Amino acid sequence: MSDIIPFITGEENAGYAKKLYADSSMVRLPIVKANRLIKLLPKNSKVWLDPSVDGCDDIDSRRSTGTKTNNWFELMKHAPNFEKFNDPSFLAKPVQTVVDEFVNHIMDSCAELRPSWITAPMLPMVNGNERNKVNRCLAKSVGKWKSYSSYIGRLILPLIITNQKQITSKTGRNPNVDLAGKCYHDAQADGFWVVDKSLDDEDGSVNLRNKRFRAVIDLHEELNERIVSKIRIGGPYWGLNLVLWAKGLVDWPAIGLGSGYQYYLSGGTMTSANPRVAIPSLRRRVRVGPALAEWLDKSIAKLAVDHPARNEFVDLKKQLTILGDSARAKEQVAKFYRDWTSTISNVPKAGRSMALFQDLSAAYALGRSLPSITSEGSVRQPSAVAESLMLSCL
């Protein structure tokens, strides 16, 4: 069985998961769509169900209106005391019994679907401490629920970072690691999941490789010292999740499927982007369009006839018209990602970090020999994505 955990958010994702990740030990579903999505998965799939409480980060922006229905809001509004989580005075001075009622409803709703894991309801991190009290209350409510319920699965404590300031310094991380440890204990959790929703690890910036990647790695190291757990999950990201996994800092790398290689809070609106395709030998994605076709022509001309990447680029150029279709592009990316993770997964755990380093080093060396990709902004250099990840491996 694969360690990879696909995050499935819709029918299209479920199709990719069934086709490409049927051997995954676990798949994660949001409760908002769980009834529909479970039917689309392989029969042997184990489900990690997320109650989608992180959407309470900003309830007002998720309210249904006369012209637009928000499915998340329509589900969550039935939970007792739901609106309390939109009240700053309540968040500052939460009442445990009020939180208990909310959590009991949420957890009972999740348990009805008999998932193997359930995410403990928690609010995302903010720069201050104004959510600390309510998150402690939420954790205690989960612990109480676990004690009296008949649920026999595992509980996963989420730590959702919303701003790099929360982890890029030791003084920023310390209180959050301490809070996570306390909440883990209070909730009687069996594992923890960490994701930085503000992190786009495909942007190739200097800040990314010099500061932000290091901060996420430090956070995981400090959490592992604070919390002893056999279920440690990181991501979804494009590649940092694989770095954390290869280094042994997480047991389960979470991944997107097709296009979503960042994490988005529940109930929010995702903007549609131009189709992007994977360049397998460079371990990165690129937007589909005339600029990509031009770059492929220049790169093909630059590479030796017998260079493996040359054949890859020739084949990709032939498929560009087809890959202009969003669904076809997403499937191409998902297939590449499956092959990439399988390559590292087949290496024994002790050697994965070096294997990933060598894998990314080859992509970096190739990218350095190729012309820049004019349509890719901060990642115009073909080697930029691989370079950032490579330097974090060892």
Image: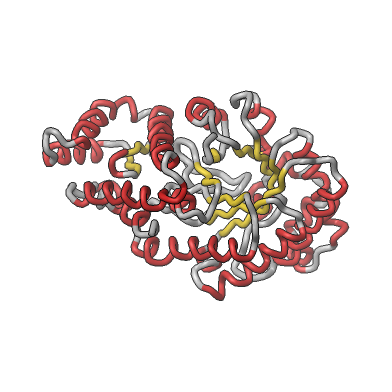
Near-viewer residue (56 or 193)? 193
Residue located 20% across and 41% down the image: 295
Position of the N terminus by quadrant: top right
In this picture the colour scheme is secondary structure
Image-based side of 334 in relation to 118, left or right: left
If the image is split into quadrants, where does the C terminus sit?
bottom left
Relative to residue 15, is residue 66 drawn left or right? right
Q: Is residue 157 left or right of residue 167?
A: right
User: In front: 292, or 342?
Assistant: 342
Residue in the picture at 44% in, 64% down: 214
Residue 101 left/right relative to 28 = right
Counting from the top left corner in percent of width and height, residue 296 is at 20, 37
Residue found farthest to the bottom: 171
Give the x, y percent position of residue 352.
42, 48
Instruction: Count how many numbered circles sit on residues in the image.
Output: 0
Seen at 80% across and 41% down, the residue is 151
Instruction: Classify residue 159 by image quadrant.
Output: bottom right
Q: Is residue 300 above or below residue 223?
A: above
Q: Position of residue 47 (x, y in %)?
A: 65, 35
Residue 190 in the image, given as x and y percentages of width and height = 70, 51
**Residue 78's image quarter?**
top right
